[in-house]
Amino acid sequence: MAATVGANLPALAAAAPARPALVCDEELWSRADLAGRVSGMAALLAARTAPGEGVALAMGNAPELVAAFLACAVSGRQALVYDPSWPAPYRAAIDAALIPALTLETLGEVPPAPFPPPPAPDSAFYVGFTSGSTGLPKGYRRAHRSWIDSFTASEVEFGLGADDVVLAPGGLAASLHLYGVIHALHIGARAVMMRQFHPRRALRLIARHGVTALYATPTQLQMLVEAGAGERFPTLCLLMVSGAKWRAETRAATLALFPNAGIAEFYGASETSFITIAHPEETVPPGSVGRAAHGVALRIRDAQGHDLTAGEAGAIWVGSSMLFDEYACGSAPETRREGDFLTIGDHGRLDEAGFLYLHGREKRMLVTAGLNVYPEEVEAVLASLAGIEEAAVFGLPDDLRGVELVAVLRGSFDEPALRAACRALLPAAKIPRRFLALESWPRTSGGKANLRALEAFAAERTRTGRQAR
């Protein structure tokens, strides 16, 4: 495999220039089309920016965004992939922090040009963005080698190859879908994307192009299941799912929709790439997120940095060559390095067989009535109960307990029955004091629950409820 992202494109185009490479809704680019766009854009970047400089890609989801990203990679520039849904203050803050040498909002026609010599494998090529503790996105910087080694892990763990047709239906500002598209193109597979995720259109793309592999979040799968009720899509062989919390009913309905698909769930982060994989052919213990991915070593450590034994809970430390370089802007105090290992503040435990169990995030851990509570544990219990589609749990200030647990729920529920079910599954101190219903669930651009907006809703409802007493 080539040592840098995109370095395979000229050889792939020369071997089969007319072979389809990239599909976006109704638009299709061949390998020759893609290589021509990327090489032409790389020449433009070389004329207007210096090696190593940042290029802001403030573009909508389209093939042009993919071409611009790959042009940055092959020319030795850093692609700053902006989210088009950011409000103006977010965009201004990121611009001020990173000072991009060039900003691209559209990409016109560019003539093909010779591909430049590949950059150094350890050079940075990508800055993505994830939610920060201040509300502003924080930028994480990745080097070519980290993604090339992630590509190797994908091929070992998922068996993806040049004959696959890979659908990544979400926005490319989310690293999951960007990674899926770029990896497919790098290995010569056909990548399928969408300008905007719509479940019915996604299912039509699966049928039309014979999609064999799909990257998705549980939320997207739920939408696909609802849109495709009663239908079957037999070409799909592999579902790669990130964002582990999903309901058993959704899993069963997903297997009915895609009867020939194995489901591989993986746990990771923007800063780490893959951490663990739960394989479809392996019996994974209930509650586990799988075993360490290819090339990954795991340690569980206490607050003093001492390694813990199997069954003991502590901070999860990840060792691999797929780790990010640094934060380009913003910070996360819970993210720490020690030698070749990194923690992002997730806590969990390993069993004797090496299976990992997540307890929650360090920054979300609450202390109520003297007891440590991970909201994720309570959320998982609530989401497993009949009628509850999604759950988010927060700790709001309380004079008696320090914090009061409040749950925001999407779905239908009877509160006395819900409390009774919780008492059978949770210690009393971990049962939320309040249950708030909310059907219009706020989400981030990547489709995840917007915890900041949900916490604000919980705080306002709790405050007004207390005033009404």
Image: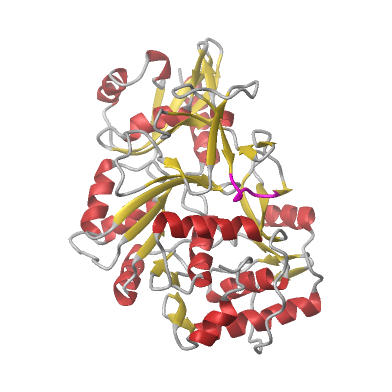
In the rendered image, is residue 134 in sight?
A: yes
Image quadrant occupied by the C terminus = top left
- Which stretch did the figure color magenta? 320-325
Picture coordinates of residue 460, whole percent (x, y)? 52, 31
Q: Residue at x 48, y 62 (%)?
A: 180
Picture coordinates of residue 136, whole percent (x, y)? 66, 46
Q: Nearer the viewer, residue 312 or 209?
A: 312
Depicted 33 relative to depicted 194: above or below? below
Could you tell whether 367 is left or right of 421 in the image? right
Helix, strand or loop for the magenta stretch, by majority: loop
In the rendered image, is residue 86 in sight?
A: no
Could you tell whether 452 is left or right of 359 in the image? right
Q: Nearer the viewer, residue 53 or 357?
A: 357
Which quarter of the picture shows residue 434?
A: top left
Q: Residue at x 55, y 32 (%)?
A: 299
Question: In the current view of this chain or complex, which residue is farthest to the left?
Answer: 230
Q: Residue at x 48, y 21 (%)?
A: 312
Please check the rendered image and state whether residue 379 is part of the magenta-colored stretch, yes or no: no
Task: Give the total number of marks visible in the rendering.
Answer: 0
Picture coordinates of residue 14, whole percent (x, y)? 54, 87
Looking at the picture, the colour scheme in use is: secondary structure
Picture coordinates of residue 351, whole percent (x, y)? 41, 28
Q: Nearer the viewer, residue 356 or 182?
A: 356
Q: Nearer the viewer, residue 276 or 200?
A: 276
